[in-house]
Image (cartoon, rainbow, N blue to C red):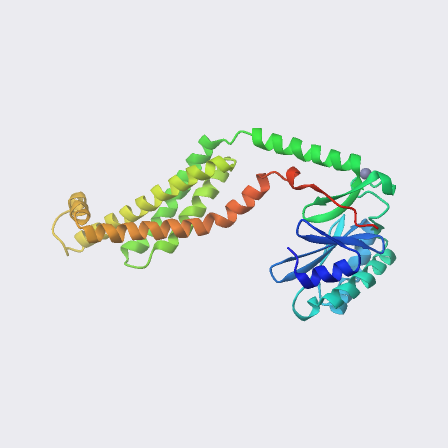
Amino acid sequence: MISKKLRKMGEERGFVTANGICYGEVNGYTVTLYEDGNYKNVVITAGVDQTAYQNLMANEKQIRDTYRILLHVQSTYVIAQFAGLSAKPEKISAFMDAFTAQLDAFGCKKSECSCLFCGMEMEPTSRVTKLVGGRAMRMHSGCAERLIDDLKTEEQAAAEQKSNAGKGLVGAVLLGLAAALPWAIVYALGYFVAWLGALIGMAVVKGYQKFGGIVKKSTIVIFAVLIILLVIFAQLLGDVFQIGYTILQGEIWGTLADIPFYMNLLFADSEYISSFLLNVLLGVVFAGLGVYGIFRTLISGVSSQSKKIVDLPDSKQ
Ligand SMILES: [Zn+2]
């Protein structure tokens, strides 16, 4: 994603806008501009070897203080994140000029003339611009094909990998049952309980993984069913605890063997049933919130990366 202002600044410098990013050349480095959340990001594709990395790190504090940015350094790119007052387009523009000149001095390799995939020299005719991991990258057209092929092979292997769902489910049920206990106890004590659904959700996913299960899109349906069943179970167990406790206290007649009798009484009451269902529903919602983050990372990890690598138009006039 890119805002109008940032895009205007880029385009004034001859940058090209495509696929939600704005990119171009600054001082021989391919630079990508994009925004996420509160940050305006400048990704500079550059070869960063050991020496260049050490030079960058030795000057990191000075760079941060000068430009008021967060700096992340990887072997093929450097990301500068701007936020708040320092995120003005003119400041970002000045940063790009000054910082790329500094990169030269630090010993970084310009992305214009060497392919970051194979490290070899690149003639303008043999190179392509690709969107890789959300940033513009120059490489040999042959290297781009190899990169995509490699990714496809990896994805194929991941897709064919056995999900081990049987073993995983044993773990999911075991940990899920253990996580139902806190719910039952907290409910029996008379406190608001639905938030503990998050614990049940996380226990199911963690248990599945601990026992060797591989999460795939298809297993998410199983998780959903299991979580609903476990929340219902936890809620029922909570009633059992509560009734059992009341009987032991002598507040109601009978022995622990009479628990089913009292459960039947409870479920004859429509008001009770609605509050039961509400608890279960809220619990499932909280469980969903608890596992949402885990699912998102897992799914983006297995989703097709190779398809996200696309051609970008060349920005060099
Ligand atoms: Zn190459």
| Res 31 visible | no
Q: Residue at x 34, y 48 (%)?
A: 181
Residue 68 is left or right of residue 265, and the answer is right
Q: Position of residue 216 (x, y in %)?
A: 51, 36
Query: To which quarter of the image does residue 98 belong?
Result: bottom right
Q: How many marks?
A: 0
Camera-side residue: 214 or 304? 304
- Does residue 21 appear in this view? yes
Give the quarter the ligand 1 occupies. top right
Q: Which quadrant would residue 305 be assigned to in this image?
A: top right
Q: Residue at x 88, y 41 (%)?
A: 123
Q: Is residue 177 left or right of residue 5?
A: left
Q: Where is residue 75? Give x, y as percent.
A: 76, 48
| Quadrant (top left/top right/bottom left/bottom right) for the N terminus | bottom right
Identity of the residue furthest to the bottom in this view: 85
The answer to whether residue 5 is above or below residue 215 is below
Farthest residue to the left: give it.
Answer: 253
Q: Position of residue 276 (x, y in %)?
A: 27, 51
Left or right position of 268 against 88 = left
Percent x, y of residue 225: 38, 39
Q: Residue at x 34, y 55 (%)?
A: 193
Residue 147 occupies quadrant:
top right
